Image (cartoon, rainbow, N blue to C red):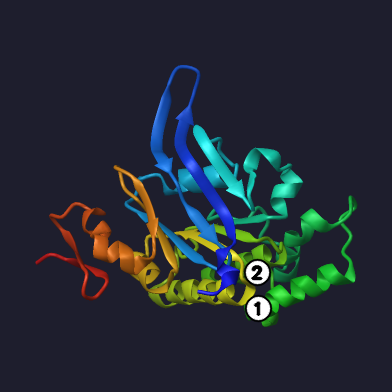
Amino acid sequence: MGAINTDIVLKTEDLAIGYASKNERTLIGSNINIELRKGELVGLIGANGIGKSTLLRSLTSVQPKLSGNILINNKTLERYSNLGLAKVLSLVLTEPLASKNLTVFELVALGRQPYTNWVGSFSKDDIDIVNQALSQINIEALKDKKCFELSDGQLQKAMIARALAQDTDLIILDEPTTHLDMYHKAYILKLLQKLAKETQKTILFSSHEIDLAIQLCDKLIVMTDKNVVSDEPCNLISKGTFDTLFPEDLIAFDANTGSFRVKK
């Protein structure tokens, strides 16, 4: 690893996440200490309902944390204005698009909103950045198509292109491979791996595709009901971290192949 990867883009310090109301506090995870560096592809994995989305919502200021610190580029989330945060963090959610009547170009151009003036007019630089994002994702041929005409895989590529056009150091995606077949799941994650290396952006995504994440990610964040750990996949395998991810009556992790198998 070269010196370029020593920059810490996202860091948490004793982070606790969950839900708080006037009368009660529901803790989902605590003592979360992670460091994500420039140019890393990082997968967030864990069983259904373990709190992956809660963690992502807390990291992106969509949901308040319970305690601890979240820092992007050595600055706590609280010190960012909404506009300032939009210039360092872009978010790709699984929610349906508000308007599928947009063309792909118009959708990707939404990524430039933090930088345009108050009437939202685009400079030549903005248009060049949108075209570059379309090119990086290899969807120039789709740019005049309406979003409702796209397949799930094409729409996901367009959403990733929008995040690229936003030109942030950190891109966070919530389950980017949902609704995709096996080929397109692998394609999207391979694309994210390529983008992290080429653009030196830090890319964090949550996924149920644990076998693919083990193969493609520089680092994994593993959530269990006991703790949240973060390390390189090979280290997590040697520590036996995946052995306790699911109830062992049905599924076992095979350390030799780095994949899960159904017990006979």
Q: Residue at x 40, y 44 (%)?
A: 51
Q: Is residue 147 above or below residue 33?
A: below
Q: Residue at x 26, y 70 (%)?
A: 259
Position in image of residue 148 (x %, y %): 63, 66
Residue under label 2: 161
| Front-lying residue, 183 or 15 | 15
Q: Residue at x 49, y 32 (%)?
A: 66
Please report whichever mark, 1 or 2, sits nearer to the chain's N-terminal start.
Answer: 1
- The total number of labels drawn is 2
Circle 1 packing at 10 Å, graded few (<14), some (14-19), many (20+), is some
Query: Residue 44: which quarter of the image?
Result: bottom left
Position in image of residue 82 (x %, y %): 72, 44
Judged left or right of residue 95, residue 225 is left
Q: Residue at x 60, y 70 (%)?
A: 4
Gap between marks 1 and 2 measured at Cα: 8 Å
Residue under label 1: 136
Q: Amino acid at mark 1?
A: Gln
